[in-house]
């Protein structure tokens, strides 16, 4: 740790300034950094400062189609979000929030990387060693630019440290094609040059992590170009999809990773997200916390507190997408719309009970397991997440969580491979069995594991993806939403599929057959909640009372039906929101950047 911080101090002396318009100043001897592998390693450690924090990741889906929350996101409210807002805030969590201080339009991390690449030329260090560290630098540059392109579309491509007089500081943005071709070149270089190591800690960038990022980036770019036909790049989509599939296949063929199944269908999935030590069989890269070092995050606080965070709650249309345990759609049941919470959570994909509180869920309080039904002091819909929060109630009230938070895991690689192959039209039964079939088997599902689906689920198509007529693609999208829920993918999955309209989905919760009546949500013989339209004369201890006769929260049929939340505050997604606005302050500095369409 001492070496690490001394290294950062030395680098900070060499690099001053924090934006695109500022230039590194040489105030220390470069030989101390670039003249030995130890120096290169210390510098390369600074690249990791840019990576997302645990809180960035587990809070990233606060704006998505499947989340109800305390308030409507400004990004989805007409006339609220603008280029001035874009200077200081982010609408979708993980996408560039507080990544090394480079949230939104910040460029400090890029300057740090380019300075390293320009100066890592000392012949006293073996070339293979220098190329390894250049591979790390180019990996982070590729990741940096991927986030920028996702957010803003066209951006300036800069691959050198700029002097204050360099005209490139005030140049126009470069085309998406140029930037993404350079991103791919950086990733290929990283794959070819980063040393092959087995990182048991799951905290270091390795060749397989570079392949995983390549698969992620290429899948995004290929599907974005395919479905955003107005960009005129659809004819190049398959090239990117092929790159994604090949990168994922290289990881699959390496034999280094496998799906975690210890604990069986009832427990294996959630163990990935509640373990303090990354589950190394499946987790590829993680943010690791440490109680002894005082490094913690706020997952328990965020997903249990009525006052902290957004009170993230899943909505019922998404819960409907979880299959029955036999592999059939839940929505094929005639009465699915009027099943109670207790009924609809039985006999389903085992990931459901490991993602939200369901009947039988308990928590540890004072060393004893106690019933923990959905807490309507927190949840607006009844579907309260447990995926990232652990069962010990003593850590709920602050930044006390120490469970490892994954950034890359093998399940995503399998999903990337399946989707890329399906979009290319080359997926086989064997591909399906090794990817979607394996994921569903881990979740206890028994049917449809070995052969490609041939029947379209009308609910999935009509509610989520009316423009998709391929049952394989539909099922892969279902699987991706469920497997990667709350891991920071959903916002940009909808962006690349051009399904922004889903952000307008009504926030609906559990079905309440009758208001003004005590309900035992977890079937333990004790009432938990009372939804009322008329204020009760007295109250039962231990029961939460919810007024469903107000504008913000109602039942769809008045005294029965699904809970609705904030239907009185409209949310709107239009085409301009597929990109964020360029922040106003930077347009004032460099008008040649130009504003994204619709945000002028």
Image (spheres, rainbow, N blue to C red):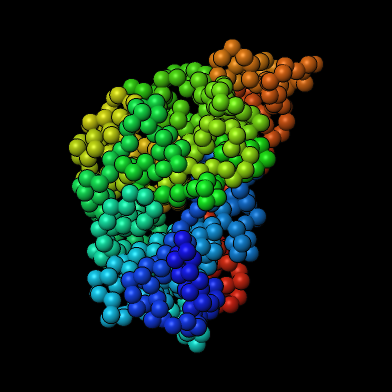
Q: Nearer the viewer, residue 355 or 7?
A: 7
Residue furthest top in the image: 525
Quarter of the image where the C terminus is located: bottom right
Asked whether, in this view, residue 41 is left or right of residue 316, the answer is: left
Q: Nearer the viewer, residue 312 or 109?
A: 109
Examine the rendering and report whether any part of residue 323 can be seen: no
- Number of residue marks: 0
Q: Looking at the image, is 537 positioned above or below residue 236?
A: above
Place residue 177 in its image quadrant.
Answer: bottom left
Residue furthest bottom in the image: 165
Identified at 19% across, 37% down, the residue is 430
> x and y percent of residue 240 in the render?
29, 57
Q: Nearer the viewer, residue 496 or 43?
A: 43
Q: Looking at the image, is 596 positioned above or below residue 369?
A: below
Asked whether, in this view, residue 396 is left or right of residue 193, the answer is: right
Asked whether, in this view, residue 291 is left or right of residue 266, the answer is: right
> x and y percent of residue 19 in the render?
53, 73
Identified at 40% across, 78% down, the residue is 32
Q: Looking at the image, is 534 positioned above or below residue 96?
A: above
Identified at 38% across, 81% down, the residue is 31
> x and y percent of residue 551 in the render?
71, 34
Q: Looking at the image, is 187 positioned above or below residue 345?
A: below
Identified at 71% across, 21% down, the residue is 532
Examine the rendering and report whether any part of residue 402 can be seen: yes
Residue furthest right in the image: 537
């Amino acid at each position: 740790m001492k070496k690490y911080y001394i290294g950062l101090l030395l680098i900070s002396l060499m690099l001053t300034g924090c934006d695109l318009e500022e230039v590194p100043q040489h105030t220390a001897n470069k030989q101390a950094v670039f003249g030995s592998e130890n120096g290169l390693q210390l510098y390369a450690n600074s690249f990791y400062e840019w990576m997302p924090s645990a809180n960035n990741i587990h809070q990233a889906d606060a704006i998505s189609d499947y989340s109800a929350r305390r308030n409507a996101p400004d990004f989805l409210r007409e006339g609220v979000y603008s280029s001035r807002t874009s200077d200081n805030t982010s609408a979708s969590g993980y996408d560039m929030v507080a990544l090394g201080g480079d949230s939104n339009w910040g460029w400090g991390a890029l300057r740090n990387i380019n300075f390293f690449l320009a100066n890592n030329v000392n012949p006293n260090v073996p070339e293979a060693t220098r190329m390894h560290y250049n591979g790390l630098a180019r990996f982070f540059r590729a990741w940096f630019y991927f986030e920028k392109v996702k957010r803003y579309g066209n951006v300036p491509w800069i691959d050198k440290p700029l002097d204050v007089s360099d005209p490139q500081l005030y140049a126009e943005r470069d085309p998406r094609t140029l930037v993404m071709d350079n991103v791919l070149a950086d990733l290929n270089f990283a794959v070819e040059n980063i040393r092959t190591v087995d990182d048991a800690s799951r905290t270091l960038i390795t060749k397989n992590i570079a392949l995983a990022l390549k698969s992620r980036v290429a899948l995004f770019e290929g599907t974005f170009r395919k479905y955003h036909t107005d960009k005129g790049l659809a004819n190049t989509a398959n090239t990117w999809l092929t790159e994604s599939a090949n990168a994922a296949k290289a990881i699959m063929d390496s034999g280094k990773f496998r799906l975690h199944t210890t604990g069986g269908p009832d427990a294996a999935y959630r163990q990935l997200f509640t373990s303090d030590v990354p589950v190394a069989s499946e987790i590829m890269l993680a943010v690791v916390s440490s109680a002894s070092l005082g490094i913690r995050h706020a997952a328990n606080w965020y997903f249990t507190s009525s006052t902290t965070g957004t009170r993230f709650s899943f909505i019922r249309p998404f819960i409907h997408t979880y299959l029955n345990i036999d592999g059939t759609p839940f929505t094929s049941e005639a009465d699915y719309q009027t099943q109670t919470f207790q009924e609809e959570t039985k006999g389903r994909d085992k990931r459901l009970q490991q993602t939200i509180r369901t009947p039988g869920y308990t928590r540890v309080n004072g060393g004893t397991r106690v019933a923990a039904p959905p807490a309507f002091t927190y949840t607006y819909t009844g579907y309260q997440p447990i995926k990232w929060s652990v069962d010990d109630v003593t850590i709920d009230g602050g930044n006390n969580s120490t469970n490892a938070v994954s950034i890359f895991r093998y399940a995503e690689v399998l999903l990337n491979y399946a989707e890329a192959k399906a979009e290319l039209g080359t997926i086989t039964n064997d591909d399906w069995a090794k990817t979607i079939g394996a994921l569903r088997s881990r979740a206890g599902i028994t049917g449809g594991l070995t052969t490609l689906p041939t029947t379209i689920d009308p609910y999935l198509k009509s509610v989520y993806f009316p423009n998709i007529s391929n049952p394989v693609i539909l099922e892969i999208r279902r699987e991706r939403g469920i497997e990667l829920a709350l891991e920071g993918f959903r916002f940009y999955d909808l962006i690349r599929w051009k399904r922004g309209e889903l952000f307008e989905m009504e926030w609906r919760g559990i079905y309440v057959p009758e208001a003004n009546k005590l309900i035992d949500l977890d079937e333990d013989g004790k009432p938990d909640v009372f939804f009322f339209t008329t204020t009760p004369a007295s109250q039962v201890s231990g029961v939460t009372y919810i007024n469903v006769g107000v504008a913000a929260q109602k039942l769809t049929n008045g005294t029965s039906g699904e809970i609705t939340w904030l239907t009185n505050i409209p949310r709107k997604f239009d085409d301009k929101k597929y990109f964020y606005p360029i922040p106003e302050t930077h347009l004032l500095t460099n008008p040649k950047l130009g504003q994204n369409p619709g945000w002028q």
